[in-house]
Image (cartoon, grey):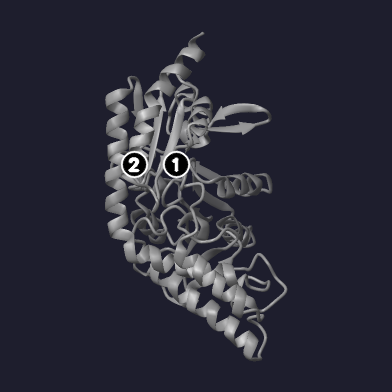
Amino acid sequence: MMEPVYLDHNATTPLRPEALQAMREVLEEVFGNPSSVHWAGSRARSAVEAARAQVARLLGAEPETVVFTSSATEANNTVLRSTALRSPRHGDHIVTCVTEHPSVRELCQDLRREGLRVTELGVDSDGILDPERLAACLDARTLLVTVMWANNETGVVQPIPEIARVAAAHGVPFHTDAVQALGKVELSLREHPIEFASFSAHKLGGPKGVGALYVREGSRFSALLRGGPQERRRRAGTENVPGIVGFGAACEAAGRDLCERSERLGRLRDRLWNGIAAAIPEVRVNGSTTARLPHTLNAAFLGADGETLVEALDLAGIAVASGAACASGSTETSHVLLGMGIPPEVGLGSIRFSLGTDTRDAHITRVLEVLPEIVERVRGEKAQ
């Protein structure tokens, strides 16, 4: 049987060995509650603080700005709900982008129904937001700008430093969902006027069930979860010590090999695309080919059904993701691709390949061996 090939790292990643080892040690030896004052609590508290410093180093920020959460979804909700609490006295306007993750997009829709004004800015055909377009829509009642750093579907990287500077020039706090950027690109948060940023451990080799929210010192902020003194009263609830420690270890490992890994995965991704383009007609890249993560390729196979391609590749032992979303029993083109102006029929024929630390040349070779025949067969079935 052929070795399985996993090319869906934007969905989740295998646990890094460093994270597994760190978590095992905590699970076996560090059982205390970090809020307890005795020796057991002190050991747990020290483990959490050491992990906080590891995460902060990868963010390019100070440890005290890192708030541990259960996920990036919780972090995103915390920022948006905290912002909504300032309305209507301080403003009533939130600006976001059409290609945001559902944990931002759906909550913005809720806030609109609750009476806030929400401006959802479009992007160009490469998936990039023009900072000048943002500047034109800001006003004295704008409470927050929230724009994703790197898109989970296309890998497109937004010009976040420039966007943050535009928001700051208008006196508007800026938040970014930086889940896919962490461990893939240099962040250096302390160098940019970014008030809030959200992260998730399982996207870079850490465990599921733990995330982080960056809160710049002095930023207006209200906790979403209340009822305890944890995280400097910024997020109540007993800390997930093993998960936090695994997150920290994954960040430390990702920081060590970031440059080498980015170069290696970029070469593998380009080899994958060049092989696809040479062997398969009627195929295109969705999104920018320059401003994107080095490990992500979103490709449209015209005349094919993306979901069927994913299923056929799965039967061949290859895991990828489609450019569609299932809703109410029907298949719809993703809002990200639609927001880029990609026709629905093209979006429905799109699949995402996302590489990771365990991706090797042999995996790319395997995909290129089976994909041309699969695409030809799926196109033929659809044409019948």
Q: Which image quarter: residue 27?
A: bottom right
In three-dimensional space, the C-alpha distance between marks 1 and 2, rounded to whole angstroms, equals 10 Å
Q: Residue furthest right?
A: 227
The image shows residue 351 at horizontal and vertical percentages of: 45, 32
The image shows residue 194 at horizontal and vertical percentages of: 42, 63
Mark 2 secondary-structure assignment: helix
Q: Amino acid at mark 2?
A: Ala
Q: Which image quarter: residue 167?
A: bottom left
Dot 1 alpha-carbon crowd within 10 angstroms: few under 14, some 14 to 19, many 20 or more: few
Residue pointed to by mark 1: 3
Residue 16 is left or right of residue 222, and the answer is left
The image shows residue 364 at horizontal and vertical percentages of: 34, 38
Vertical arrangement, residue 56 with respect to residue 360, above or below: below
The circle drawn on residue 362 is: 2
N-terminal-most mark, 1 or 2: 1
- Identify which residue is drawn at 34% across, 45% down: 292
Check whether the beta carbons of the residues at disc 1 and disc 2 lie within 8 A of each other: yes
**Residue 29 in view in this figure:** yes
Residue 33 is left or right of residue 185, and the answer is right
